[in-house]
Image (cartoon, grey):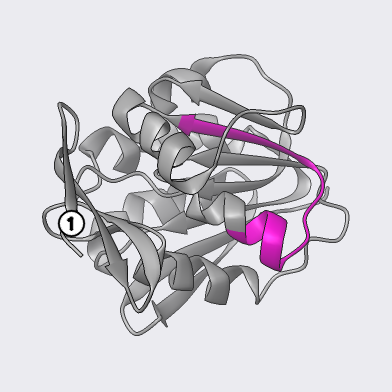
């Protein structure tokens, strides 16, 4: 089956392909949603407990593979707020993967940094998966961003950051999270390659 190609001003050419019978969303150089990326989040979420998690924030929704995982595989029934800057990807998530806003899912088309600047309720779990193609935009590796994001976690709340990069580039991220009262663990080679930063805010 021919890949469906869609142009995005943010992400360049996006492709909807079928891999092993599963529909996936790819950018030029990487898996954007479902496929390998969904496996990364599946293996990561499998190592934590969702007990007591009432509100989840997703920064970088993509095609919504983490939402599908949370709802279908992990049977999560709480509130989810998903942030995605690219309206083209939001439309793909809706049309191709049936991910759409409802009473328990708010999808906001905006820059994740702008959302983090807003005064909102805190979250029990935050998933950070912000890429343009296979690169994390520099502002999302800045101390300022992570200082503000760390304030969005409830006591005992958790941030999971798909860093997909070497430890040196995220040194500032880890240091800022620790300064902000989080216990930080690096989960290496998830699904063979990805580095996930797992940060839990101290309860007191």
- 81 drawn magenta: yes
Q: Which quarter of the rendering shows the N terminus?
A: bottom left
| In the depicted structure, whether residue 41 falls above or below residue 189 | above
| Residue 1 to residue 177: above or below | below
Q: Position of residue 72 (x, y in %)?
A: 69, 61
Q: Position of residue 108 (x, y in %)?
A: 51, 22
Q: Mark 1 — residue?
A: 3
Q: Which SS class for mark 1? A: loop
| Quadrant of residue 12 within the rendered picture | top left
Q: What are the residue bounds of the magenta stretch?
A: 69-83
Task: From this view, report whether residue 108 is shown above or below residue 82.
Answer: above
180, 101: nearer the viewer:
101
Please tell me which residue is depicted at 75% across the width and 33% down the height of the picture: 104
Q: Who is closer to the viewer here, 174 or 38? A: 38
Is residue 60 at all visible to an observer of this figure? no
Residue at point 54%, 77% (across, down) = 43
Q: Position of residue 198 (x, y in %)?
A: 55, 63
**Residue displayed at 30% across by 66% down:** 18
Q: Quadrant of residue 124?
A: top right
Taking the image as shown, residue 127 lies to the left or right of residue 157, namely left
Horizontal and vertical percent position of residue 150: 58, 39
Q: Nearer the viewer, residue 15 or 113?
A: 15
Q: Is residue 47 left or right of residue 145?
A: right
Q: Any magenta on residue 40?
A: no
**Residue placed at 54% from the left, 49% from the top?**
127
Mark 1: give few (<14), some (14-19) or many (20+) Cα within 10 Å. few
């Amino acid at each position: 089956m021919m890949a469906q190609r869609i142009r995005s001003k943010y992400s360049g050419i996006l492709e909807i392909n079928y891999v092993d019978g599963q529909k996936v969303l790819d950018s030029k150089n990487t898996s954007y949603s479902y496929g390998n990326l969904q496996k990364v989040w599946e293996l990561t979420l499998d190592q934590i407990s969702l007990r007591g998690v009432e509100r989840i924030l997703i920064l970088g929704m993509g095609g919504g593979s983490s939402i599908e995982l949370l709802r279908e595989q992990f049977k999560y029934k709480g509130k989810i707020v998903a942030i995605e800057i690219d309206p083209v990807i939001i439309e793909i998530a809706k049309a191709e993967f049936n991910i759409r806003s409802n009473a328990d899912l708010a999808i906001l088309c905006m820059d994740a940094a702008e959302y983090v600047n807003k005064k909102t309720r805190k979250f029990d779990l935050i998933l950070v998966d912000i890429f343009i193609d296979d690169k994390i935009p520099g502002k999302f590796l800045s101390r300022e961003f992570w200082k503000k994001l760390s304030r969005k976690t409830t006591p005992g709340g958790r941030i999971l950051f798909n860093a997909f990069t070497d430890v040196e580039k995220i040194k500032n991220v880890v240091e800022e999270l620790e300064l902000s009262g989080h216990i930080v663990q690096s989960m290496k080679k998830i699904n063979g390659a990805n580095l996930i930063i797992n940060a839990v805010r101290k309860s007191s």
